Image (tube, helix red, strand yellow):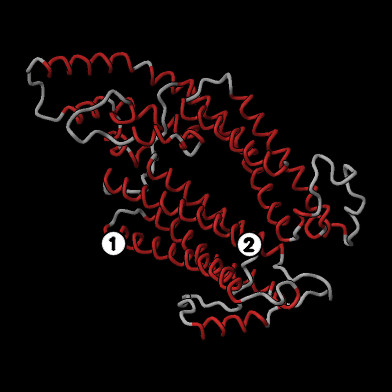
Amino acid sequence: MMESRLISAFRKTKSIVNQISSNSRLSRSGVCISNEPSSLIHSKTYSSFSFDLIPASQTSIIRSLSNLGFKAFRRHYPNHKGFCRPSFRNLSTAATASTEKKDGLRLLVTAGPRAQKLVGIWLFGSAAWVFSMVVLGGMTRLTRSGLSMTDWKFTGRLPPLTDEDWLVEFEKYKQSPEYKRVNKGMSIDDFKFIYWMEYAHRMWGRALGIMFALPFSYFLRKGYITLQLGLRLSGLFALGAGQGLIGWWMVKSGLEDPASEYAEPRVSPYRLAAHLTSAFVIYSGLFWTALSVVMHEPPAESVAWVKGAAKVKRLALPVSILVGFTAVSGAFVAGNDAGRAFNTFPKMGDTWVPEDIFSMKPLLRNFFENTSTVQLDHRILATTTLAAIGGLWFSTRKLDLHPAIRSLIGSIVGMAALQVCPAKF
């Protein structure tokens, strides 16, 4: 049904192109054919074409992987110098806006292309900030700095500024289980390093909240943001605020004495996984919303591209879910310090499968708390994910795809290989 509508719509393009070419020649020869700007004439000419094409292509393209083409994003905006480039997306912008209610194409920013661009840049910047937060959090974890601050305030506070202030913070840390069992005898200079790492991570998150809230308030006041987008961004902002609470909830579990006398204090792997998963959800939501803002129209230059992108979407969804499970399993590896248990690959020590993978009772605990099982699970998931991404590339290599989609699929394969190979070797 959808393909028939698309084919019918594209049959109209020949007469449309001829009409535009004729108008362009008359304009260059000095003949005045209309008092209206050429871009408006072209947009009106394409309006009937947009009525047929946009509803049919919207279902199969919008929010698909083709939205990730940044080259297409740059070409998305119309030329505001009075000239109109020969691109369907640019020529159909006015028609799309006029048929928003009729054809169900929902614009998330309604104050024009400039407002759309500003909101898009802000959302992409927020997503990049969240990404940097995840990286900084990983560095804090690797340097074992997360338990250096033994209290938490929602609004934050100034760091120690005098020697007396540092001694007070150091005395607080000396009362923690980590100092008594792991870092006993640590110098104050070493303590300052881990303290600054955790302090930077916390304050960077608070700065992100300010950077997000101020432009959000401004755009709401100016009327740039629709109700649909406002509700979505409010939900993401609430998740970001809750992320600070989840972080403290996680740290608090590491400040409690371990059940075993000889066990090292560490944060709960369940809470660590929740903290990381929440960060992934916020990042994905911001990035997805930014793409929805700047590319509200489906890129439908050809029927083959429409069908190819729809197939890529169907194939990419299960692969994306598998990537998510692999990332969360990595949080359990970190939370259980399972990464150091076996340093050989593909075997784990001298065996393929350790004998104690089901030693805990009940059985389900092994998948989240047993060091051997957690690392084995992560290895299996990571290898399966790499194979699935390779399968995605192989399945799409003969499809007729937008160049941006094809290049991104290749980039995903490279990133997956870059992620898996260092972990194994």
Judge whether 243 appears above or below 152 on screen: above
In the rendered structure, the answer to whether residue 29 lies left or right of residue 342 reads left
**Residue shown at 46% from the left, 67% from the top:** 206
Closer-to-camera residue (247/298): 247
Q: Earlier in the sequence, mark 1 or mark 2?
A: 2
Task: Please give the name of the residue rendered at 71% of the width and 61% of the height, measured from the top-left corner.
Answer: 335
Q: Which mark is residue 422?
A: none
Mark 1 or 2: in front is 2
Kindly identify the amino acid type of the residue bearing the numbered disc 1. Answer: Arg
| Residue drawn at the location 9% of the way across and 14% of the way down | 29
Number of dots carrying numbers: 2
State the residue position of label 2.
143
In this rendering, position of residue 82 left or right of residue 368: left
Q: Neighbour class for label 2 at 10 Å: few (<14), some, many (≥20)?
A: few
Q: Position of residue 121 (x, y in %)?
A: 36, 48
Q: Nearer the viewer, residue 224 or 342?
A: 342
Nearer the observer, 2 or 258 = 258
Q: Residues within 10 Å of mark 1 (few under 14, many from 20)?
A: few
Tell me where residue 174 appears, x and y as whole percent: 66, 81
Q: Is residue 95 above or below residue 172?
A: above
Q: Position of residue 216 (x, y in %)?
A: 36, 60
Q: Helix, strand or loop at disc 1?
A: helix
| Quadrant hosting residue 79 | top left
| Amino acid on which disc 2 is placed | Thr
Residue 221's tag is: 1
